[in-house]
Amino acid sequence: MNHRQTAKHPDRLRRRLTSRLVLALAIATGATAAVGAGASASHRPHASTKVVTATMAYEIAHAGQLKTNAFCGTKPITLGILDGLGVNAWSQYSMAAVRSEAAKCKNVKQVVEIADGNLQTAISQINSMVSQGVNAMTVIPDFGAAELPAIEAATRAGVKVVPWAANPGGKPGVDYVSYVDWVPAYSGRLFAHWMVNALHGKGNVIVLGGPAGNPVSASMLAGVVDVLKSHPGIRILTGTKNWAVTNWDPATAQQVTASLLAKYPTINGIFSDYGTDGLSALHAFQAANRKLPDLAVADANGLGCLWKQNKNTKNAFALATVSTRNWLGRVAARKAIAAAEGIKDTEPSLYDLTFYENSLAGMTPHCAPKQPAAAYLSDSIAPSVLAKWGKP
C-alpha cells in the first residue's frame, strides 16, 4: 500500500506531498501517471480503459475529486450503498460523497440502506442487497469484524464489496475488493505530537470517541498513547485502553464532557475523531464557565467559527484538525463500480492525512458563517449536493 511517513515530521510530509501536486495536475487533465506515495511503476492505469487516477497527494488536496467517469464502464449494474450508523451529519456527508460520485454513471442504479446503529440490521441489509442482485457495494461497517462474515458471503456471491471508514478486518483482495480509509493511528500520533507542543509537555487531556469497541476510535487512541507514553507530563484522564464513549452523537458528547468536567478540576486538551463531538465538548466547557481547552480533532465548520470568535480573548484555544474524510466515499464508489465493470482502479486505498487546520502553524481554521456548524468544509461537498444526495 502507500508509503508511510512518521508522525514526528508532519511538515516534511506536507512538503513531500505538495511537491507531487505538479504531477497530479497533469493527471487531472487526463494524462497517465504512476499513483501515490510508494507505488511501484507497475501500478499504472490500465491503458485500454483510460482510467484517470491521481497520487495520494492530489486526492488529499482535492478531497478525492477526479474529473473523470472512466470508472463507470458501460455495463448496467446496481450499486448497494450501506451506512451502518446513518444518524448524524457525518453520515449525511458520507452518503452524499458516495451517491454523487455514483451519479456520474448513467449505467449505475443505486440501492441505499441505513442500519441506524444496529448490528443485526446491518448484517440483514448486506444479505438483502445480495439477494436483490446488486453487483457492487460500498459499506461503512461501523461494527467492525462483526460484519466481516456478511461481507465475505457477499464477495463469494460475486458482489464487488468496498468497505470504507471503519475497518472490518479480513484481507483486502480476498474478502473484499479493498478497504478505503484514513489511517486513524497515524492521525492519533500526529495529534499527540501537536498536543505536546500546544501544552508544552504538561497537562490533562481527555479522549472522546464513538461506540465502545469501534475500530476507528481504538486505532486513533492507540496512536495517541504511542506518542504520549514518552511524555509523562501529559495525563490521559479517560485512560489508555478506552475512550469517553459518545456514540458519535453530539448531545451525548456534551453530556459526557459535562460529567468529566464535574469529575476533574483541570482539563487542558481534547482528542476526538469526530469534529461535531469536539464542538459539543467545547459547548460543555462554555456551559461550565471553564477555560476552553486545546483541541486536536477532525474538522467541523463550527470549530473554526468558535476559534475565530475567541482567538483574541482570554478564552482563546489552539486548534488542529485533519479532514473529516467523508470524501473518501468518492474513492470507495469508484473502486466498487470499477471492479464490477472489470476496470482496474489503482487509486490509493489508505491515506495518511496531514493537517487541514493548525492554529499553531499559521494554518488558520476555516469558518463559513452561512453553513451549519456541522458542515465539513474539507470534503468540498456543496450544500446543494448534500441536500440532493445526503439521504437514502
Image (cartoon, rainbow, N blue to C red):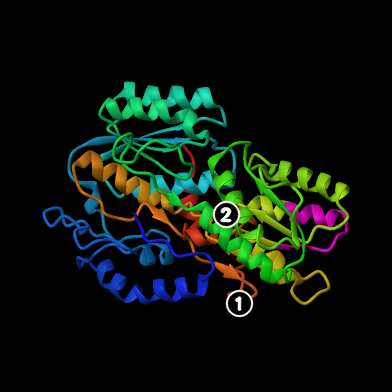
Res 216 → quadrant: top right
Of labels 1 and 2, earlier in sequence is 2
Q: Is residue 103 visible?
A: no
What residue lies at 30% left-to-right and 40% top-to-bottom? 177
From the image, tell me which residue sits under label 1: 361
- Find out whether the residues at labels 1 and 2 contact each other: C-beta distance under 8 Å: no
Amino acid type, mark 1: Ala
- Relative to 352, residue 102 above or below: above
What residue lies at 45% left-to-right and 52% top-to-bottom? 385
Pinpoint residue 347: horizontal percent, then vertical percent: 30, 55
Amino acid type, mark 2: Gly
From the image, tell me which residue sits under label 2: 223
Q: How crowded is mark 2: few (under 14 residues within 10 Å), some or many (20 or more)?
A: many
Label disc, if present, on residue 263 of the rendered structure: none
| Of residues 68 and 235, the one drawn nearer to the viewer in this rendering | 235
* Image-based side of 266 in relation to 1, left or right: right
What residue lies at 49% left-to-right and 50% top-to-bottom? 386
| Of residues 70 and 200, the one drawn nearer to the viewer in this rendering | 200
In space, the residues marked 1 and 2 are separated at their CA atoms by: 21 Å
Q: Can residue 297 be seen in this view?
A: yes
Pinpoint residue 387: horizontal percent, then vertical percent: 50, 48
Quarter of the N terminus within the rendering:
bottom left
Pinpoint residue 6: horizontal percent, then vertical percent: 48, 64
State which region is magenta.
Answer: 281-294
Q: How crowded is mark 1: few (under 14 residues within 10 Å), some or many (20 or more)?
A: few
Can residue 288 be found in the magenta stretch?
A: yes
Mark 1 or 2, closer to the camera:
2
Query: Mark 1: which secondary structure?
Result: loop
* Image-based side of 111 in relation to 198, left or right: left
Query: Mark 2: which secondary structure?
Result: helix
Res 13 → quadrant: bottom left
Can residue 52 be found in the magenta stretch?
A: no
